[in-house]
Image (cartoon, rainbow, N blue to C red):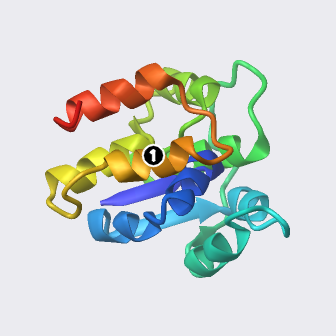
Amino acid sequence: MLIVADSSALIALATCNCLELLDLLFEKVIVPKAVFDEVIVEGKAVAESLSYYLRRKVFNADLKTIIINTGGLGMGELEAMALYKQLHADYLLIDDKRARKVAQFNHIKITGSQGILLFAKQKGLVTEIKPFLEMLMDSDIRIHERLIAKTLQLAGEA
């Protein structure tokens, strides 16, 4: 299976030290150049680990692929959606709420960083996801408490 990743979810997974789960769950993980450029900005908390992880996973997106955009999306999100369509990917890894809505409108199958944690638990790659969610809650990443509670419930850890 192929997954195209956007910056928000990659940053979340790097923050809780879970990037390797992507390689265990998917045959191929790729990002468009704009996403790579967004996540490796010097001074960002996880820039170095993302730069190392993504070094051979960067692809150029063909922006001629039609994505219906309701406005307000960044170049990384648009390129990620275009690359998903271009390569007929299985999933788009994306956390941003507005971008997820646009992706769904464009018939793009999505998952987020918490979805990856749930997949990993279902596959037996991790025994519990609560410690990872706690790492995210302790970081600068904003996640609504209801989403955390729902994820823990789905994982059987509520």
Q: Nearer the viewer, residue 94 or 122?
A: 122
Residue drawn at x 62%, y 68% as measured from the top left: 59
Q: Which residue position holds label 1?
A: 134
Q: Which amino acid is tagged 1?
A: Glu
Q: How many marks?
A: 1
* Location of the N terminus (image quadrant): bottom left
State whether residue 56 appears in this view.
Answer: yes
Tag 1's secondary structure? Answer: helix
Q: Is 82 situated left or right of 111 in this image?
A: right
Relative to 72, say whether 127 is above or below.
below
User: In the rendered view, does 128 fall on the left or right side of 95?
Assistant: left
Name the quadrant of the C terminus: top left
**What x and y, as percent, mark residue 10?**
56, 56
Q: Is residue 133 above or below residue 17?
A: above
Q: Quadrant of residue 108?
A: top left
Residue at horizontal 19 percent and vertical 57 percent from the top:
127
Q: Residues within 10 Å of mark 1 (few under 14, many from 20)?
A: few
Query: Furthest residue to the right?
Result: 42
In the picture shown, does residue 57 fall above or below 122?
Answer: below
Q: Is residue 71 left or right of residue 133?
A: right
- Across and down, in percent, residue 32 comes to 65, 60
In the image, what residue occupies the spot 53% across and 30% down? 103
Q: Residue at x 69, y 25 (%)?
A: 69
Residue 17: x and y, percent? 48, 66
Q: Nearer the viewer, residue 64 or 71?
A: 71
Q: Is residue 89 visible?
A: no
